Image (cartoon, helix red, strand yellow):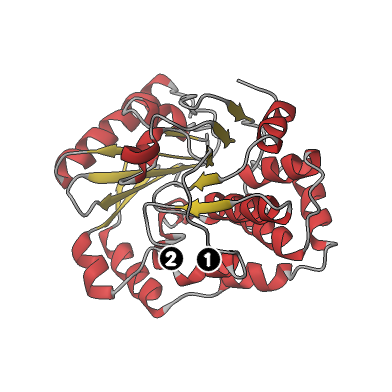
Amino acid sequence: MISLNEAAEFLKKSDHILILCHVFPDGDTLGSAAALCRGLQQTGRHAAVRCSDKIGPKYRYLFEGVAPETFEPEAVVAVDIADVSLFGEPLRALYGDRVDLCLDHHPSNSCYAKRCFVDPKAAATCEIIFRLLRLMEIPVDRQIAACLYTGITTDTGCFKYTNVTPFTYRIAADLVETGMDAPTINRKMFDTKSRAHVEMECRVWDTMEYFYSDRVAVIVITQRMIRETGAREDDLDGISALPRQVEGVLIGVTLREKPAGGYKISLRAQKPVNASEICAKFGGGGHAGAAGCTLAVSLEEAKEQILAGIGAYLNKHAAT
């Protein structure tokens, strides 16, 4: 582990910097990457962002005006990526063993990079990027502020999750003071749904099952559902939060079929449940309120395994 000051000094001495995002990219990994890329390009450095998955229309505004660059990286930086397994292909094959710096807020980070700065108290990695840019004396203009705000508002559920701290609000206030349009970003992230998203929600609700005295709710997203609704990655944002919205549910489980087989498991938990502790038993991780893992098995086996893990957790924490 290194300090954020050391991370800033490393970047000050670097040029031709490649910034990596995780698969199934969300607002935090993309906002962090876009903000850092913009800041580095402002200083005359060569910087570019790569992701194994295509960036959909919902988040493209983050990269408007960013100069596209192609180069052999001198430094590789991973943002909001807890483990190399989240790079996806081809990024894992290309850069899995050559990440120079990792900036992250997941307590389950495997410290795979040559240099790691991880702050589990940060509500979003974008909080870390904000602090980093300040240390590098890079001005946070309206475009950078919009990127950072996007990551913070999406990772905090528009500031309603328990990961929000007083510092989170202070950063958000500083970002709003740049003149960036926070209401429009919030509306785009939370109050605007594509028709494909609405259709997917309808289908997902029909798959919901309840377990353990209705404290656990499970939904399923299949590749067939994705094909038939025409849903893009952006259209699936927020789906995994649906089971937890049901009154009385402590743990919401989403089983999403992967294109090559197997299932990506997403857990969303209410206090006092720790979703990360459950997912860690399956080689995954994340945060107390939101975590994930992958199971390379059939749907029934994936459901059976994750429910057994949840049952063991609930038995261990009988007061939950």
Label drawn at residue 234:
2
- What residue appears at the point 31 percent right and 38 percent down from the top-left corner? 93
* Disc 1 to disc 2, C-alpha distance: 8 Å
Quarter of the figure with the N terminus: top right
Label drawn at residue 69:
none
Q: Nearer the viewer, residue 76 or 125?
A: 76
Q: Quadrant of residue 222?
A: bottom left
Outermost bottom residue = 195
Mark 1, Cα crowd under 10 Å, few <14 / some 14-19 / many 20+, is some
Query: Helix, strand or loop at disc 1?
Result: helix
Image: 42 above or below 264: below
User: Where does the image place residue 270, in percent across and percent down from the top left?
Assistant: 52, 41
- What residue appears at the point 48 percent right and 50 percent down from the top-left corner? 71
Task: Answer left or right for 305 relative to 238.
Answer: left
User: Where does the image place residue 45, in percent across and percent down from the top left?
Assistant: 66, 49
User: Where does the image place residue 301, in percent across and percent down from the top left?
Assistant: 16, 39
Residue 293 appears in the rendering: no
- Please tell me how many numbered marks the rendered image carries: 2
Mark 2, Cα crowd under 10 Å, few <14 / some 14-19 / many 20+, is many
- What residue appears at the point 61 percent right and 31 percent down from the top-left corner? 120
Q: Name which residue type carries label 2.
A: Asp
Mark 1 or mark 2, earlier in chain? 1
- What residue appears at the point 47 percent right and 72 percent down from the top-left corner? 57
Q: Disc 1, disc 2: CB below 8 Å?
A: yes
Task: Answer left or right for 216 relative to 148.
Answer: left
Q: Name which residue type carries label 1.
A: Tyr
Label drawn at residue 59:
1
Query: Helix, strand or loop at disc 2?
Result: helix
